[in-house]
Image: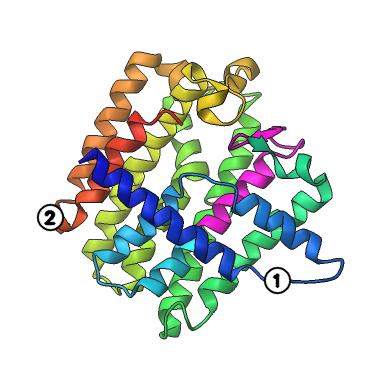
Amino acid sequence: MARQLEAALGEAAEAVSRTLAELLPKLTGPEARVVEAMRYATLNGGKRLRPFLVLETAKLFDVPRERALRAAAAAEYVHCYSLVHDDLPAMDDDDLRRGKPTTHIQFDEATAILAGDGLLTFAFEVLAEERTHPDAAVRSDLVLNLARAIGVEGMVGGQMFDLQAETMRLDLDAITRLQALKTGALFRFSCEAGAILGQAPPAARQALRDYARDLGLAFQIADDLLDEEGTEAEVGKKVGKDKAAGKGTFVSILGAEEARRRASSLADRAVKQLDLFAEKADLLGKVARFVVERRA
């Protein structure tokens, strides 16, 4: 069954990468440099986990493939924007991402900022176009939910919290809230986008939100474990930075073994949230196990 998930992840990553490349504008003139940086930040590999979640949840409601791919691409544009900005000297100050120079190292800081801005705004352009869904109310719902996921009550607020956390002593509840904003909110959108496209009933949307909540926390705990125990070659970026900075993480508060146990428990709970969909959600269940067992 692990091979089934691996094959599905690979197929989805290829389809999403093609869509990402096809949708990005092709410009000439001085402004072409920012598009080159956007392409560099977006088409340089990655697990494509968030778009995979969009595609798999869309299948639950028989959403046409093109619509699902466009929403999946929007989620990945936003994720890549967040990585570009996270890596900047004013934020995490990283020079390696996915085993390659970060965007501000490959280009320059100003271009990286503009590339991130370009990816963020382009995601909304893709969602707002009629090809994503013929019903304007559905497109509006997608735009609204993405905006909420990545604004001050989501990713942006979580990043601010994370920066402030460098000078704060956080307990487990605070760490959980921080990561629910910074990491979990985009997982929530990615899991709910398929239901929005499929105009699913409230109970189905809630089940996917609950799944995303548990999945996002399990993913973040696994990330904290990788930062503590992984290698730069495995992770594709510098490790040990949180510990060196004295930042609170799930591992620093719980210890590695308890953090591992908690991640596994969250993955099990995420799988239970999918009972409503029975075997149609089989791959989504396998993803929950994958995120806690991965080494990258």
Colour theme: rainbow
Q: Earlier in the sequence, mark 2 or mark 1?
A: 1
Place of residue 105 in the rendered image (x, y in percent of width and height, measured from the top left): 77, 39
- Examine the rendered structure and indicate whether residue 219 appears above or below residue 60: above
* Residue at 82 percent of width and 45 percent of height: 108
For label 2, the SS is helix
* Residue at 35 percent of width and 70 percent of height: 196
Q: In this view, does 86 lie to the left or right of 250?
A: right
- Residue 173 visible in the displayed image: no
Q: Is residue 23 left or right of residue 264?
A: right
Place of residue 221 in the rendered image (x, y in percent of width and height, measured from the top left): 41, 29
Amino acid beneath label 1? Lys
Pointer 2 residue = 278
Q: Residue furthest right?
A: 30
- Magenta extent: 76-99
In the rendered image, which quarter is residue 251 located in? top left
Disc 2, disc 1: CB below 8 Å? no
In the rendered image, which quarter is residue 279 located in? bottom left
Pointer 1 residue = 26
Place of residue 254 in the rendered image (x, y in percent of width and height, measured from the top left): 39, 17
Q: Which of marks 2 and 1 is in front?
A: 1
Toward the viewer: 178 or 189?
189
Amino acid beneath label 2? Ala
* Residue at 83 percent of width and 50 percent of height: 110
